[in-house]
């Protein structure tokens, strides 16, 4: 019998497992896939290492939440600062600003001098707990309207809405300022070697401290027993433990195998009525070119006339090890509209060809993923990227609490801390603290 069974080897499960194993808990982790990572994985095609989902990390600056967690885990995780500038292309006009908080403030003040006072007031207020407590029930658009008249200022400060999956008019203001501020304040980082190297290093630390990871083991049923719980995998193997930590998809798991488990009132209500976030259509391009061809092409692209927003990242400009010599990787992310893969790829291809001239002559490899792809590999309900919908009605304590049943906990992007790698890591840290009863575990 184990002390803890963790279902799913994503970031939340791995961080939680590392903390518990460090303090002597007997922990086993069941992962349905043949590799660890969940949404933070990579795949290889033709010498290219493509990051399937998570591609940039926040909270990695000195003192940042993810930085502190990883440092205390003592896991080997080499992170590279992506660049010194962020780019936003709005209606074919490029705005490039420094990836520091002071740099952004200065840039916005120079761009719209008449808004200078409001700019400084805005950035001061979003760190105030008194102000943040009033952001729970308003949209990010409403919040920005309280400070600015300038449309371009509001568009720049909203450009990263894809990181939360809701357009600014529906996006919870509190979620927006929490996530966006970490990017503005600390910039973005890329894990050297790609997302898979990052998670495998954390998994290695978990094993070194006594944890056990079982790959290609899908949990299909959970039963309450006198001493705790029994988890049954798809081969019929039974694992007993006092505590269960679910790092798999909340809706899919309890829909398929949790019928015998009593969820608490909040968890049951969200299971029955909670709305999941959007999914993405992603294309991954491996091309043969020199640096100049892709330089200054990453960033956010917004076409207000067409009503489109998409993100381009070029991780090979940061880490040369992820692709062959004289080649680069281009990743493209747009909200998934549910159409056929070929139709969505053609739509993205039109966008790419307008930015990268003659790209068709340089393409070596193209791969795609839609909501069905992510649902197959991660079990995320309908392939959703961020757990719950980040609307103004799914904020704070109206999200899933960490404790969802008697000695059953939830970590990852369905849990209270929210979505993204940093938030998933925080959820793992907090649940390890709750189970162990040790404050300051990390």
Image (cartoon, grey):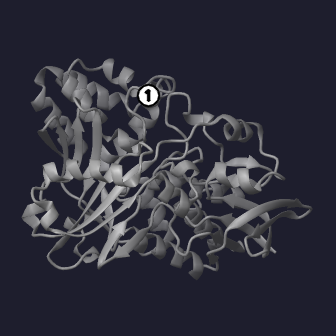
Give the percent coordinates (x, y) of residue 259.
80, 51
Q: Which residue is mark 1?
A: 170
Give the percent coordinates (x, y) of residue 66.
44, 58
Image point (76%, 57%), residue name: 257
Q: Please state if 284 lies on the left or on the right of 153 as rendered.
A: right
Q: How many marks can you see?
A: 1
Give the percent coordinates (x, y) of residue 278.
47, 42
Give the percent coordinates (x, y) of residue 324.
22, 79
For residue 368, which quarter of the picture?
bottom left
Q: Quadrant of the C terminus?
A: bottom right
Image point (58%, 47%), residue name: 414
Q: Please state if 27 lies on the left or on the right of 355 as rendered.
A: right
For residue 46, which quarter of the picture?
bottom left
Q: Quadrant of the N terminus?
A: bottom right
Q: Looking at the picture, does residue 380 appear above or below residue 107? A: below
| Residue 419 appearing in the image | yes
Name the one closer to the observer, 220 or 95: 220
SS of the residue under disc 1: loop
């Amino acid at each position: 019998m184990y002390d803890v069974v963790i279902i799913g080897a994503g970031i939340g499960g791995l961080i939680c497992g590392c903390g518990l194993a460090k303090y002597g808990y007997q922990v086993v982790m069941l992962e349905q896939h043949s590799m660890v990572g969940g949404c933070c994985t990579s795949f290889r095609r033709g010498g290219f290492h493509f990051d399937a989902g998570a591609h940039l990390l926040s909270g990695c600056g000195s003192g940042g939440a993810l930085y502190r967690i990883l440092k205390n885990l003592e896991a080997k995780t080499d992170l590279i600062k992506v660049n010194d500038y962020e780019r936003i292309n709005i209606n074919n006009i490029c705005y490039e600003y420094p990836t520091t908080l002071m740099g952004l403030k200065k840039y916005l003040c120079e761009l719209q001098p008449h808004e200078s006072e409001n700019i400084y007031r805005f950035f001061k207020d979003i760190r105030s707990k008194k102000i943040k407590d009033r952001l729970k029930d308003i949209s990010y658009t409403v919040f920005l309207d309280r400070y600015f008249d300038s449309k371009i200022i509001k568009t720049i400060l909203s450009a990263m809405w894809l990181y939360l999956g809701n357009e600014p008019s529906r996006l919870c203001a509190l979620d927006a300022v929490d996530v966006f501020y970490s990017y503005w304040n600390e910039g973005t980082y890329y894990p050297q070697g790609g997302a898979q190297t990052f998670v495998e290093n954390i998994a290695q630390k978990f094993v070194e401290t006594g944890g056990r990871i079982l790959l290609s083991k899908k949990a299909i049923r959970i039963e309450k027993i006198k001493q705790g719980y029994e988890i049954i995998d798809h081969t019929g193997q039974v694992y007993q433990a006092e505590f269960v930590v679910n790092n798999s998809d909340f809706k899919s798991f309890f829909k398929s195998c949790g019928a015998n488990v009593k969820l608490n009132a909040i968890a049951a209500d969200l299971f029955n009525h909670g709305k999941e976030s959007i999914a993405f259509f992603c294309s991954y391009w491996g091309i043969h070119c020199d640096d100049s061809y892709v330089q200054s092409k990453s960033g956010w692209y917004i076409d207000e006339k067409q009503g489109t927003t998409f993100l381009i990242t070029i991780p090979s400009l940061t880490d040369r090890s992820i692709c062959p010599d004289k080649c680069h990787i281009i990743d493209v992310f747009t909200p998934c509209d549910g159409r056929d893969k070929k139709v969505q790829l053609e739509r993205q291809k039109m966008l790419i060809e307008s930015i990268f001239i003659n790209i068709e002559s340089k393409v070596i490899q193209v791969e795609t993923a839609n909501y069905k792809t992510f649902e197959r590999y991660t079990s995320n309900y309908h392939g959703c990227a961020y757990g719950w919908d980040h609307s103004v009605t799914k904020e704070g304590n109206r999200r899933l609490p960490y404790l969802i049943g008697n000695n059953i906990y939830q970590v990852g992007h369905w849990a209270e801390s929210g979505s993204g790698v940093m938030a998933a890591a925080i959820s793992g840290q907090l649940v390890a603290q709750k189970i162990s009863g040790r404050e300051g575990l990390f």
